[in-house]
Amino acid sequence: MCKLFLDRGSFTDFTSISNIFIDEYMPEANGEFVKIYLHLVRLINSSFTTSSELSTEQIADQFNLLDSDVMRALNYWAAKGLLTLSFNQEKKLTGIRLEPVQMPYTVSKENVLAAASGEVASVPVPDSSGVVIPAKKKYTAAQIRQYSSDERVQHLIFLAQTYLGKTLNSNDINSILYMLDELHFEVEFIEYMMETCISSGHKTLSSIEKQAVEYAKKGIFTEEDAKNDEKLRQAICREIYRIFGCAPKAPVRKDISYISKWTDEYGFPDEIILEACNRTMEHTHTGSFQYADSILTNWYQKNALSMDLIKQLDSAHEKDMQQSFQSKPTIRRTKKAKTFEQRNYNYNDLEKKLLSGRDRKFQTKKNEA
């Protein structure tokens, strides 16, 4: 392997990037997220001063991304503490402030204990869907040993090992500390999540952590709120089955995964989900969750998150279809008229040929005789 040598050459126009960012933040970040952060630093270090020139749409066009992708990147760096995002009352982004790049935050034992006892209130950080979930931190082996000495953490580790029937590894304990310290769930609620997830067949701490993240997105931090959410989910299941013409039944896991995707990941209200189901029946005449998912995924990718925006998409689609139909050339088939050429006959020549043929025929019969 050859060594690489970097030559600065005559390079003068540059943007300064913190070595801490390169060493500590960049390796684990999504590549598109890194691009957007570097773009913001570039704007700050340049003569860019007019805020009206900057928008998430402008950034999305710059990197050929969706506006939602830009928001996810901004939310990611905000959760890391490198950005502070400002929102108006309608939860629309109005400002971005770059924060000093510091070494990643290391949790203290006091924070773990406070979170476990419920003394630390969750602080919602708005994003395009309402909240931003803090990025999961990787605890060192020394930190895990320190936190594992706390009674509350020991209690959760014991319960998890009992439920799962195995000894937890460092990743499993990281999940427990993440739910305690970053998501600020109480011990009792984490116990509830363990019981419900494992009883439904999700027998890993990563799946329990995923459920915790979904609850945090919805602002659910108690067992009562979780049960109310489950009732609402069952209600939407009943409505979907009614539209699909299915007999009332308990939702199966595959159906629940689709509905969770529509409600949790896409953030669609019941009205839009039921509209997609109705359209599924109109087009396929069968209760296909897969077909309904294709409709909702298309709406989500086009940021049609309300019925008004969906109607706009319908109008635009109808207009495109009309233009496409009108632009097609009309092919008319007409019968091709037959034409006959006028022939000119020389009757003298015809008479000579006729007499000549008759003489040859008479001579042949005479010879035969």
Image (spheres, helix red, strand yellow):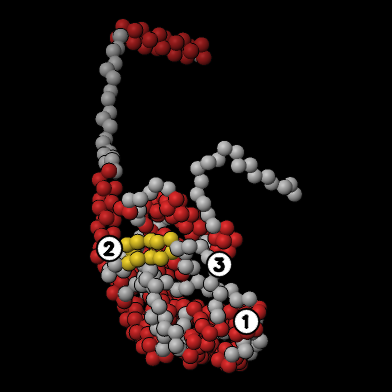
Which residue type does callout 1 highlight? Answer: Ile
Q: Position of residue 91 (x, y in %)?
A: 31, 68
Graded by Cα atoms within 10 Å as few (under 14), some (14 to 19) or many (20 or more), the crowding at tag 3 reads few
Dot 1 falls on a residue whose secondary structure is helix
Observer-side mark, 1 or 3, equals 3
Q: Position of residue 4 (x, y in %)?
A: 69, 46
Graded by Cα atoms within 10 Å as few (under 14), some (14 to 19) or many (20 or more), the crowding at tag 2 reads some
Label placed on residue 161: none
Q: Please tell me whether residue 32 is drawn above or below residue 288 in the rendered image.
A: above
Classify residue 242 by image quadrant: bottom left
Q: Position of residue 195 (x, y in %)?
A: 51, 90
What's the residue at 60%, 85% (across, down)?
147
What's the residue at 59%, 74% (across, down)?
138
Instruction: Provide the residue designation for mark 3.
Output: 103
What's the residue at 29%, 9% (across, down)?
347
Which residue type does callout 2 highlight? Answer: Leu
Q: Is residue 231 left or right of residue 363?
A: left
